[in-house]
Image (cartoon, rainbow, N blue to C red):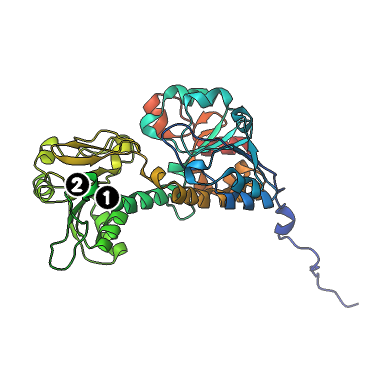
């Protein structure tokens, strides 16, 4: 009798069957509300009619307060044709479970906010009040700040776009105020044959500095850039693709360069709190009469000692004969471009959230989005804000684990 060798049947597999475990998410139909902004001279709207059209065709609903797109020259008709519902009553818009704002939450918004609402908006650290945060915490709100929203490459897409706009706009603004029509020096920003180019000083080699430098060079100006971060100076040169005059911020050298420039741009950033003041009042007093200072850092306090916040209606004032432009929200002056840039980031994000079955489910898959959240179901998850306002901090990853 022949002995059979024990055989293992191939029908027994000890591999986990992944495809049976991975249950496809149930798509969620979302209701999104966009109110009309009344504060901070805000002209932008966070979703363009085209973006609304995409969301609606994917089964989502969008409510827009009448006139919300006017500042960006998008009409109510554009939105209704894209499938949005135009609402005349402000309170109705605020009933949407997802609220998308282009200005920060203000005192007047608080009574209208819903419990457990999801809010996308800028945060504007310089004007944020503890009382507003606490009220949002009481309503168990989940809030996402545009400034902190990261993409999968680790950069901040909305901040980047707004910085590109501000940087490019800075030189257009400078050119305007150097012209005779605005009682400027009557100097053409840039250079023509036989005439020395206008001299531009840029403080800060971040995105604003880079785009200001690109625009100034394209106009033919001579550009000098100051920053204490050597890596940033190197990156700026690589990105612009040409050798440029760069320096660390050394006060004597800076003062000397400011004395002879036509335009000085403040584009220094700070991770938390106030921008460093690097140009003293005395340095400004030695600048040429009719030269122009544009302080893009004004929303974080500014980097010129003589800077004071101005508005889009009255953008400039003169101090020591130097024209100062200190409007905090420069991209809002180019509202249509800025709205398209914000919309390009938010629309795909909202589509993903819908497909994953809600924003909270998306956070499980896309860790990088967690950086943008400063409130999660009413818990404060931003360490910097908790320190600043002495409020209890909760780690978002721990919250996610317990809610999962």
**Quadrant into which the N terminus falls:** bottom right
Mark sitting on residue 220: none
Q: Is residue 1 above or below residue 145?
A: below
Q: Position of residue 352 (x, y in %)?
A: 61, 51
Q: Quadrant of residue 62?
A: top right
At x 52% / y 38%, what residue is drawn?
Answer: 101
- The local secondary structure at tag 1 comes to helix
Q: Is residue 101 left or right of residue 295?
A: right
User: How many labels, in total?
Assistant: 2
* Extreme-front residue of the structure: 181
Give 202 or 19, whichever is nearer the viewer: 202
Residue 55 point in image, percent of width and height = 64, 49
Q: Residue 203: where, in percent of width, then height?
A: 22, 48
Quadrant (top left, top right, bottom left, bottom right) of the C terminus: top right
The crowding category of the residue bearing disc 2, from other C-alpha atoms within 10 Å (few below 14, some 14 to 19, many at least 20), is some
The residue that disc 1 covers is 176
Q: Earlier in the sequence, mark 2 or mark 1?
A: 1
Nearer to me, 239 or 106: 106
Tell whether 272 sits left or right of 354.
Answer: left
Q: Residue at x 36, y 44 (%)?
A: 330
Provide the residue designation for mark 2: 184
Residue placed furthest toward the bottom: 2
Is residue 289 visible in the rendered structure shown here? yes
Q: Nearer the viewer, residue 349 or 110?
A: 110
Query: Cβ–Cβ below 8 Å for labels 2 and 1?
Result: yes
Is residue 392 placed above or below 262 in the rendered structure?
above
Is residue 356 visible in the rendered image? The answer is no
């Amino acid at each position: 009798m022949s002995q059979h060798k024990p055989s293992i049947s191939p029908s027994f597999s000890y591999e986990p069957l992944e495809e049976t475990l991975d249950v496809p998410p149930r798509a969620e139909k979302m209701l999104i509300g966009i109110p009309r902004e009344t504060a901070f001279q805000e002209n932008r709207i966070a979703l363009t009619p085209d973006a609304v059209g995409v969301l609606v065709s994917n089964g989502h609903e969008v409510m827009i307060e009448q006139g919300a797109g006017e500042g960006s020259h998008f009409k109510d008709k554009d939105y209704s044709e894209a499938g949005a519902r135009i609402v005349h009553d402000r309170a109705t818009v605020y009933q949407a479970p997802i609220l998308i704002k282009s200005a920060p939450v203000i005192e007047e918004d608080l009574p209208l906010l819903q419990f457990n609402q999801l809010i996308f908006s800028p945060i504007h650290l310089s004007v944020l009040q503890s009382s507003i945060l606490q009220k949002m915490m009481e309503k168990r709100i989940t809030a996402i700040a545009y400034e902190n929203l990261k993409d999968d490459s680790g950069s901040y897409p909305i901040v980047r776009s707004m910085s590109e706009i501000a940087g490019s706009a800075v030189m257009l603004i400078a050119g305007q105020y150097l012209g005779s029509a605005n009682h400027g020096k009557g100097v053409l920003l840039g250079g023509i044959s036989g005439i020395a180019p206008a001299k531009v000083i840029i403080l800060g080699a971040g995105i604003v500095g880079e785009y200001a430098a690109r625009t100034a060079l394209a106009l033919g100006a001579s550009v000098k850039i100051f920053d204490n971060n050597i890596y940033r100076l190197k990156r700026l040169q690589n990105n612009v693709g040409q050798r440029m005059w760069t320096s660390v911020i050394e006060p004597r050298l800076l003062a000397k360069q400011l004395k002879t420039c036509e335009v000085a741009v403040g584009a220094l950033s700070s991770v938390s709190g106030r921008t460093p003041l690097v140009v003293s009042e005395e340095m400004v007093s030695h600048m040429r009469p009719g030269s122009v200072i544009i302080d893009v850092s004004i929303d974080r306090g500014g980097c010129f000692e003589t800077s004071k916040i101005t508005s889009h209606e009255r953008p400039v004032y003169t101090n020591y004969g130097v024209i100062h432009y200190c409007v905090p929200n420069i991209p809002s002056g180019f509202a249509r471009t800025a709205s398209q840039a914000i919309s390009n980031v938010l629309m795909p994000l909202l589509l993903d959230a819908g497909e994953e079955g809600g924003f909270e489910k998306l956070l499980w898959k896309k860790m990088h989005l967690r950086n943008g959240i400063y409130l999660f179901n009413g818990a404060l998850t931003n360490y910097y804000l908790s320190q600043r306002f002495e409020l209890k901090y909760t780690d978002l990853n721990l919250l996610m684990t317990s809610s999962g």
